[in-house]
Amino acid sequence: MTLARKGIDFSPYDHFTIEEWAALRADEPMTLDGDDIKRLRALNDPISMDEAEQVYLPLTRLLNLYVEAVQGLHRAAASFLGHKNGARTPFIIGVSGSVAVGKSTTARIVHALMQRWPSSPKVDLVTTDGFLYPNAILEKRGLMMRKGFPESYDRPRFVKFLSDIKSGCRRISVPVYSHLVYDVVPDEHITIDQPDILIVEGLNILQPGELPASGEPVIFASDFLDFAIYIDAKEPHLNEWFTERFLRLRDTAFKDPTSFFHQFSKLSEQEAIKMANDVWKGINLPNLVENILPTRGRADLILTKKRDHSIGSVALRKL
């Protein structure tokens, strides 16, 4: 008889229904109101106040415990090494998942809730879009149709950024990406200055990369994450959400003459649906299957969404 038949559970995760997860909120207070939720949610991600309370308040409570534990570990290590009065090492949270799954909404709500902790920590939010190579470089390398794939990012620069954050460097410059012009904005940056907590949102942040045969140590972006969240959903739902978002953008942002996508604002609904499906099948789906989905099992927390975009279950990695 195999161990599995004996009822031994080898899953690295504990699984929760929403009701079970919501009960873990305990007495964590809700510090956001309805207007905050409307402001923070993405274009086609209809998160409700109830879901924010049931899912993100327990998550905030859990993160508070993790931050305290990791900071305690850093203090213990500093004491062992004889380092006195050292600065606190920033806690880095990664938020990953497919295109159109709602990463931005999750990252923004977690950011807003953590900023309002009683300890008033300094919490910053960065997306990996700013670390995409500019379109001119992508075109030169023949990568425009693989934008969002790992090779389209300046990974050494991103790893250095995370290393600088962990090292306590001051006033770190981060490139700005514009979804309107679909490119990195030249000479425009945001400055990250010694946050207590940094949230990083992006497609490929959980990838470990290939290890050299020599055994030499190699540092990957995922090595800097203290806690990783993966937003999961079935592929047909993701395709549907991507198409819905494309249609809404066609009627809003695409109408701006300065938008890279202005050329598509005159498409009929049928033409727009076809184009969205072509983009999904030709770019986003291969990236999901080849690069993003394989990293799901590296996350500390998996939030699985239902077709209506609501979160249906939670999986938390066992310690």
Image (cartoon, rainbow, N blue to C red):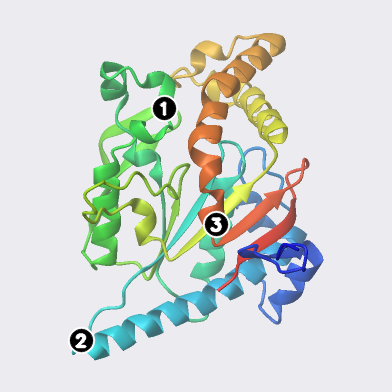
> Residue 81: which disc?
2
Look at the numbered disc 1 and give the secondary structure of its residue: loop
> Closer to the N terminus: mark 2 or mark 3?
2
Answer with mark 1 or mark 3, whichever residue precedes in sequence.
Answer: 1
Q: Amino acid at mark 2?
A: Leu
Q: Is residue 162 visible?
A: yes
- The residue under label 3 is 229
Which kind of residue does numbered mark 1 sit on? Lys
- The first of marks 2 and 1 along the sequence is 2
Quadrant position of the N terminus in the picture: bottom right
Crowding near the residue tagged with mark 1, few <14, some 14–19, many ≥20 C-alpha atoms within 10 Å = some
Residue 150 shown left or right of residue 213 in the figure: right
- Residue at the spot x=61%, y=43% of the render? 42
Disc 2 vs disc 3: Cβ atoms closer than 8 Å?
no
Examine the image and state in which quarter residue 123 appears: bottom left
User: What percent of the width, then of the height, locates residue 24?
Assistant: 71, 75
Crowd rating for badge 2 (residues with CA inside 10 Å; few <14, some 14–19, many 20+):
few
Q: How many marks?
A: 3
Depth check, front residue: 9 or 226: 9
The amino acid at mark 3 is Ile
Residue 225 vs residue 252, the one in the foreground: 225
Relative to 152, residue 115 above or below: below
